[in-house]
Image (spheres, rainbow, N blue to C red):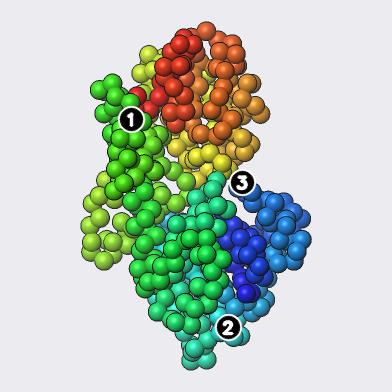
Amino acid sequence: MKICILGTGYVGLVSGTCFSDLGNNVICVDRDQKKIESLNSGKIPIYEPGLEELVIKNFKQKRLSFSTDIDLAIKKSNIIFICVGTPTNKKSNATDLKYVFQVSKKIKKNLNSYKIIVNKSTVPVTTGDKIEKILKTKSNKGKFDVISNPEFLREGEAIRDFIYPDRVVIGTNSLRANRIMKSLYLPIIKKKSRYFKTSRRAAELIKYASNAFLATKISFINEVSNLCEKTGVDVKDISLGMGLDQRIGDRFLRAGPGYGGSCFPKDTQAIVTIAKKFKTNLSIIKTVIKSNNERSKILLNRILNIMNNKIKNKNITFLGVTFKANTDDMRESPSLKLIPMLLKKGANIIYYEPTGKKSEFSKYKKVKYQENISSACKKSDLIILHNEWNEFKQLNFNKLVNKANFKIFDLRNLYSPKKMNKTNIKYFGVGR
Ligand SMILES: NC(=O)c1ccc[n+]([C@@H]2O[C@H](COP(=O)([O-])OP(=O)(O)OC[C@H]3O[C@@H](n4cnc5c(N)ncnc54)[C@H](O)[C@@H]3O)[C@@H](O)[C@H]2O)c1
């Protein structure tokens, strides 16, 4: 099939590359010229395991191309995927749909034959109706179907999630569009993914409800972990004991620094805002947002406690600063809140991040980047294991740190407290 991807970010690039690997002809479009130039010269603008090899392979086989010419790309394609960003409008807390509407207007101009407009961006329920309204003219009648196909991939696992998803959700009432989408996804459905056809509005809401539910699980276990700390219980036992109940399941029940990234914070806010528009109070999700916002304050107090309130001029090392392992994405990372709070208390921050130096911290004089774990830890008073990259999982801290009495605060519970205590390291985890 001839596919055009509008917006070549995390979702667009992964989706476009995977569809091309399944044998389709894909043009990935972006208005960011630098991004397209970089992709055309074989450089991948994001860190995503396995993506580079797949892009290069399909680019060489001429199934995958990159362009800034949105008009031509739309004209040449039968299926148009909208994969542009849908950020939160900071003033209204509503989803900013300007990029979605910008590309919809471009599609309207270039409908030279029947096309399926597939919205993969995460959008409030009823957005598909608005896109359809933009496209509808007398001359465009019967020339398009607007459908919803929300994306559930996780950064860091994106290729696997795309090729082996639990489900493919298609929201449409058009038999024609459904038939074409089913054949596009056939190689994926054959690998035992469930193909679920529903209404367009339901598909839009399934995405928001799913993210809000996962965010709820994370916040739930984080709050339980606060109680574990006070009662001498290991939260890992709670997660395991709860997770063994198949009605609950053990995934997304790991205590940590709170949820971040480009999706959960924005999508929880967005579903609350759209619900308000329809005069519905989503009180549970509102509480989850509040609970997650308070997480950094709880962690700061824990750090003050661990350091006996002596943080001024102490060297605090962060291992990892992105919102989780295996991604370079800094959007809404917990470190963006925690590091400024520690700076205010007079700490010196050193960080090592496997995906390199982050511009978000360049405005702080007392935040220094180190290119490897050992130079980041050498003079540390406190090491904060901020995320769970494999390279952080088997470190010999006594060899890494030159200072006596250094401490470790493990926000991902990567190490065994028992083993750590045997090495005389002052080790603290979350909820244990
Ligand atoms: N990142 C994730 O893990 C993830 C997972 C599932 C769903 N989503 C959703 O997918 C959507 C995209 O997310 P993302 O993380 O890929 O965003 P992103 O910011 O990485 O990429 C969006 C891209 O769209 C481009 N763009 C914006 N306006 C454009 C226009 N008018 N014409 C052409 N290109 C344009 C931008 O330049 C950018 O490259 C969002 O709605 C997000 O909520 C994201």
Task: Nearest to the eye among marks 2 and 1: give it.
Answer: 1
Check disc 3 and report the residue beneath it: 49
Q: Amino acid at mark 3?
A: Pro
Between the C-alphas of marks 2 and 1, the distance is 57 Å
Is residue 305 visible to us here? yes
Residue 128, located in which quarter of the rendered image? bottom left
Closest to the observer, 309 or 112: 112
Task: Nearest to the eye among marks 3 and 1: give it.
Answer: 1
Would you place residue 119 above or below residue 290 in this image? below
Q: Element under label 3?
A: loop
Between the C-alphas of marks 3 and 1, the distance is 31 Å
Check disc 2 and report the residue beneath it: 111
Q: Amino acid at mark 1?
A: Asp
Q: Element under label 1?
A: helix
Task: Nearest to the eye among marks 3 and 2: give it.
Answer: 3
Check disc 1 and report the residue beneath it: 237
- Label 3 crowding class (10 Å Cα cut-off): few <14, some 14-19, many 20+? some
Q: Residue at x 27, y 61 (%)?
A: 276
Is residue 313 visible to us here? no
Residue 196, located in which quarter of the rendered image? bottom left
Give the image location of residue 76, x and y in percent: 66, 78
Between the C-alphas of marks 3 and 2, the distance is 36 Å
Q: Is residue 76 left or right of residue 385?
A: right
Q: Ligand 1: does it lie within 8 Å of the C-beta at label 2?
A: no
The answer to which of marks 3 and 2 sits earlier in the sequence is 3
- Label 2 crowding class (10 Å Cα cut-off): few <14, some 14-19, many 20+? many
Give the image location of residue 12, x and y in percent: 57, 60
Closest to the observer, 111 or 101: 111
Q: Residue at x 44, y 31 (%)?
A: 412
